Image (tube, rainbow, N blue to C red):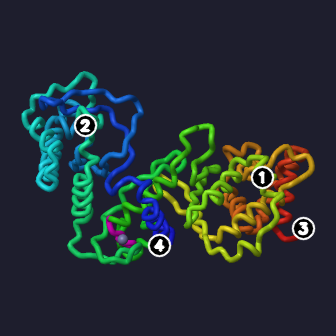
Amino acid sequence: MYMRRLVEFAEQHANDLPPVGYARRSYQWFVVITHDDRFEFIQADRGEQRVIPNRSRASGVSPILLTDKAEYVFKLPKNPANAKRAAECHLAYMKLLKECCEATRNELVQKIVQILERQDWQIPDGMKSTDVILFRTEAGDFPHEDNKVKKFWEDFLIKNSSKEENDSVCFICGRSAPAVKRHTIEFSVGKERTKLISANESAYLSYGLENSEIAPTCFECEQKYGQALSYLLRKYANKKQHGGPHMMEIGNVTYVYWARQNDPETTSMFTFLSDPDPVAVRRILSSPFKRAENHGSLDRICILALSANKARMVVRDYAEPPVWKVKNQIRQFFDAQQIVGAPKPASIYLLAACMYRDGRKEMQKEDVQDWMNWALYGKRLSERIVAKIVRRIQARGGMTWIHAAAIRSWLISQNKE
Ligand SMILES: [Zn+2]
């Protein structure tokens, strides 16, 4: 279900997401095509990023349209021993570029092909074989931003996404189309770069199917869910702010959330769970329950709990509760932890960490999930939680405000106030 919802999100936010086959990537060089048909090399600022053509590639030779590495664009080998590979890469790159010329009749791309074929460029000092190249005109136009070029790249990737002759029924959109061989888009979860491969659950493998074949996905859906999830996993540019507009990280668990009808108020309430602003929490607590009023609204929020395991993304939990229910529950979460003398509202992290001497090291993913399940869905906190808190209080010979807040929350979650 969450895959379908991610594709739906991508369709609703098409203007915010990169086109198919494009991604936000960093690059190292501008190559300006001068009015007298030469290349002029300009080094880009460190860390500069733009939305440019992209594809995930394994060990073989597979060129990226226009914005590839110097190895492909300028035949620049990693070291002299790799000259043969660089020549192969360049050949494949040129072939793709010429196909693009044929299909789009784009004058700029034609010029690039001509200059590259003359082979009279001088590779500038400091250019590495892995540096990514961006072509542009003196006026600042980029050939990869042309609509016909975009369409050509999308069609090319669709054609090359599957070697299968037979169509399968895509498990997301239900259309009959060739299934992608493997899912290509990578996601940052915690400190890892991961891929979502549902087939890594061993239960599926008993059917004797490999890779993504157990859940056939068409190229379009694979791109859409990937673009959507990358977008939702974005963090705030300002490092002082926790998480991102649609995500938060608590311990080793990453929560991603989005309202199906794009309601910024609901998503901002999530921020309070990881970083509670006392003023905002007081406002939530003092506002009257609007249960009757909100019951009618069918708007739902999608909540995905993720973690990383050896470069694989693990989907730990997915739910789609009604927005009004989650709002009321977050309110109850803050209400339940209120104790006399508390200096501030407690975040999920503080509550989950207070069971340990060193929460940062000892906290388990299950602890975070237990507390989040209480804060979002009103699920009872488990016996395990209270047992750990009591042991921690005994070990340190006394209790702090956060222990009191955690115990009060636990009691209320049992419906035994
Ligand atoms: Zn599909």
Q: Amino acid at mark 4?
A: Ala
Quadrant of res 135: top left
- Report the Cα–Cα distance between label 4 and label 1: 43 Å
- Report the Cα–Cα distance between label 2 and label 1: 50 Å
Q: Which label was assigned to residue 203?
A: 4
Q: Quadrant of ligand 1?
A: bottom left
Q: Earlier in the sequence, mark 4 or mark 3?
A: 4
Q: Determine if residue 157 is in view.
A: yes
Q: Is residue 195 magenta?
A: no
Which residue is rendered at x = 76% and y = 65% of the image? 382
Which residue is rendered at x = 68% and y = 56% of the image? 269
Please tell me whether mark 1 sits on a helix, a strand or a loop.
Answer: helix
Q: Earlier in the sequence, mark 3 or mark 2?
A: 2
Q: Which residue is mark 1?
A: 281
Residue furthest front as drawn: 139
Q: Residues within 10 Å of mark 3 (few under 14, many from 20)?
A: few
Q: Are marks 2 and 1 in contact (CB under 8 Å)?
A: no
Q: Amino acid at mark 3?
A: Glu
Q: Is residue 215 magenta?
A: yes
Q: Which residue is mark 2?
A: 136
- Report the Cα–Cα distance between label 1 and label 3: 22 Å
Q: Amino acid at mark 2?
A: Arg
Q: Amino acid at mark 1?
A: Val
Q: Which label was assigned to residue 417?
A: 3
Q: Magenta residues?
A: 213-219
> Residue 233, position in %: x, y?
51, 52
